[in-house]
Image (cartoon, rainbow, N blue to C red):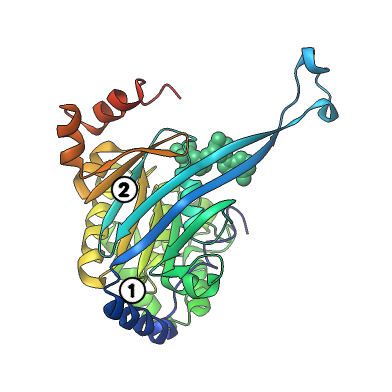
Amino acid sequence: MTGEKTNLAVGASEPTAFLLLGVFKLREKKGMDLAIKCKGITKFFYETNSGGKSKGGFLPWSGRNSKLTAVDSLNLEVNRGEIFGIVGPNGSGKSTLVRLISTLLLPDRGQIEVFGLDVVKQKSQVRKLINRVSVDAAFFKKLSCWENLSYAARLYGVPIKEAKRRATEILQRFGFQEGKITQPMENLSRGMQQMVAIARAFFTSPVLLLLDEPTTGLDPKSKREVQEFILRVRESHDSTVLLTTHDMDEAEKICDRVAIIDRGRIVALDTPKNLKFMVKGESLEDVFMELTGKSWEED
Ligand SMILES: Nc1ncnc2c1ncn2[C@@H]1O[C@H](COP(=O)(O)OP(=O)(O)OP(=O)(O)O)[C@@H](O)[C@H]1O
Ligand SMILES: [Mg+2]
């Protein structure tokens, strides 16, 4: 198994219906319409520096650990049914935030709730409500596309016939070549692998879908298909979608609201229209430049 190990582990399954019912009943009672609530989230990583000549040469043991703040006292609320975009330059903390929400990382400070459930204390309940698709989806690379999908179907408790029907429907919509379904995953292009990862995520009906750069590496047509698919899923499944992207057009096109993140902090959050209006800019890139004083590629 290569890539990130966790994609399969984080998935809703059909027997979650009872849990969902409980969550939605509780939500009705409390008027809880928040899908995600992050309160003062901070995540540190420790990096080993080689030290450099002045600090004692290039030997590995001459290095020192430095503390990096990937997510910095971040507050965020995502409403149920929203398609919420997180945009920001490389290394700004987008994937770390997604991994924190999806229970794959523990926050060093702060609290995260998914539909009122604490992601640390109620991890297994949270996992049943979410599904994550990352740009580096995990597959058994030597196994065929279909073998990977049927493995996931068994894991999620989806009958094989049903899994085949759903996967075929989604993959056909993406224009996935039929013959490729029996090919080993390692023979598929990155874009094709991405399509399979998305199809796999929809074996179940996740209440919260965490998409980390779902369209990176796709050609324009496939990109459009995936974007339309995300819009359709929101309508048909009453899902909430948190999506990270580098594609500003994508964020403007499909997101209800967008948070612009820089060095682990949210520098702006609003509808794409309001964000552009705020800085009298043409695009979200203009918003980023105006708020941070630097261009998108600079960091
Ligand atoms: N496991 C880790 N160990 C150490 N540092 C990490 C780890 N994961 C992320 N980082 C660091 O945390 C910071 C934020 O990384 P993250 O992957 O969240 O950024 P990103 O916004 O998703 O970037 P990109 O747009 O390139 O995907 C970066 O400086 C990165 O090097
Ligand atoms: Mg990332």
Q: Residues within 10 Å of mark 2 (few under 14, many from 20)?
A: many
Count of marks, rendered view: 2
Residue 15 found in image quarter: bottom left
Closer to the eye: label 1 or 2: 2
Numbered badge on residue 85: 2
Identify residue type, mark 1: Arg
Residue at the (25%, 70%) spot, across then down: 238
Left or right position of 100 against 236: right
Outermost residue, top side: 54
Residue at the (46%, 74%) spot, across then down: 128
Residue 131 found in image quarter: bottom left
Q: Position of residue 223 (x, y in %)?
A: 29, 47
Q: Quadrant of ligand 1?
A: top right
Q: Position of residue 137 (x, y in %)?
A: 50, 55
Figure check: 292 above or below 177: above
| Element type at mark 1 | helix
Pick the front one: 142 or 277: 277
Residue at the (36%, 26%) spot, across then down: 296
Figure check: 173 above or below 48: below
Numbered badge on residue 90: none
Residue at the (53%, 66%) spot, across then down: 8
Left or right position of 23 against 277: right
